[in-house]
C-alpha cells in the first residue's frame, strides 16, 4: 500500500510541473517572436490553410492578400509600436520582416543590393509618370545597389532623378502636357 500514495504524489508533482511550465509558456508566449513575428501570430498563420498554402507555394501576392485578410500587419505593428517613435520607421521595419521571411516587397518599397528595403520616393514616381507622358524620359527605375531613383532620356542617357527634376519641374511638365492634349484635340477636330 505505501507505493500507491507515492505514485499519486509523483503524479501530482508531474501535473503541477506541467501546469507551471504551461503557465509560464502562456505568460511569456505573447512576447516571444519567430524571425521577428510574435508567436501568437505565427500560430494563427500556421492554423490558416490558405496562408500556409500560399507561403509554401511561394505565391507572394496570394500570401500578402491572405495576411491582409488576417490583419497580420496591424497585429505585428501593435506588437512593435511601443519600440518606435516614428510610424514610417515602424512600417518599414514590419515590411522588412515580411521581406526577410517571404520575399514579398510592398508597393511602397524597393530592395537594395544589401537586401534591405528602402521607401520609394512617391514624388519621383509621380514625376516620372508625368515626364514619360510628356516625352521627356523613356524610362525610370531604382538603382539595385543604392536604391536611388534614376531616369532614362529618350536618347538613352541615364541620370539621377535629383539632377534632372530641377530642369523639368512638375508645374512645367503639367503645362506642357496640357498643351500637348489641346493640340491633340485640335488635330482630332480637323481630321474627318
Image (spheres, grey):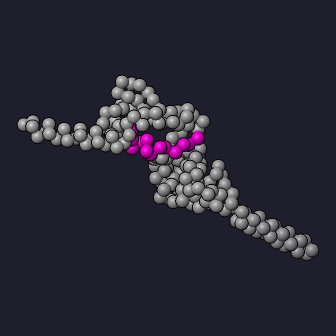
Q: Nearer the viewer, residue 132 or 108?
A: 132
* Magenta-drawn segment: 116-128
Whole-percent x, y for residue 178 in the image: 25, 43
Residue 179 shows up from this direction = yes
Relative to 33, is 9 on the left or the right? right
- Residue at position x 48%, y 56% from top? 68
- Residue at position x 47%, y 36% from top? 162
Whole-percent x, y for residue 54 in the image: 50, 48
Tell me the quadrant of the picture where the N terminus can be found. bottom right
- Residue at position x 50%, y 33% from top? 143
Q: Nearer the viewer, residue 83 or 180?
A: 180
Q: Is residue 36 above or below residue 161?
A: below
Relative to 22, is 134 on the left or the right? left
Tell me the quadrant of the picture where the C terminus can be found. top left
- Residue at position x 52%, y 45% from top? 119
Task: Choose top left, top right, bottom left or bottom right for residue 179.
Answer: top left
- Is residue 146 found inside the magenta-colored segment of the image? no
Amino acid at each position: 500500500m505505501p507505493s500507491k500514495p507515492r505514485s499519486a504524489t509523483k503524479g501530482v508533482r508531474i501535473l503541477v510541473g506541467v501546469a507551471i511550465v504551461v503557465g509560464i509558456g502562456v505568460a511569456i508566449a505573447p512576447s516571444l517572436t519567430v524571425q521577428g513575428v510574435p508567436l501568437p501570430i505565427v500560430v494563427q498563420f500556421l492554423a490558416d490553410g490558405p496562408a500556409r498554402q500560399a507561403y509554401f507555394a511561394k505565391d507572394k501576392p496570394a500570401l500578402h492578400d491572405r495576411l491582409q485578410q488576417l490583419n497580420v500587419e496591424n497585429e505585428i505593428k501593435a506588437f512593435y509600436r511601443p519600440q518606435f517613435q516614428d510610424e514610417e520607421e515602424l512600417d518599414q521595419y514590419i515590411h522588412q520582416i515580411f521581406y526577410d521571411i517571404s520575399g514579398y516587397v510592398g508597393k511602397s518599397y524597393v530592395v537594395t543590393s544589401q537586401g534591405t528595403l528602402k521607401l520609394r520616393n512617391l514624388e519621383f514616381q509621380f514625376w516620372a509618370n508625368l515626364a514619360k507622358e510628356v516625352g521627356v524620359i523613356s524610362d525610370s527605375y531604382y538603382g539595385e545597389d543604392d536604391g536611388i531613383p534614376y531616369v532614362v532620356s529618350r536618347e538613352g542617357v541615364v541620370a539621377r532623378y535629383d539632377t534632372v527634376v530641377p530642369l523639368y519641374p512638375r508645374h512645367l511638365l503639367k503645362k506642357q502636357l496640357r498643351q500637348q492634349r489641346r493640340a491633340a484635340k485640335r488635330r482630332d477636330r480637323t481630321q474627318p
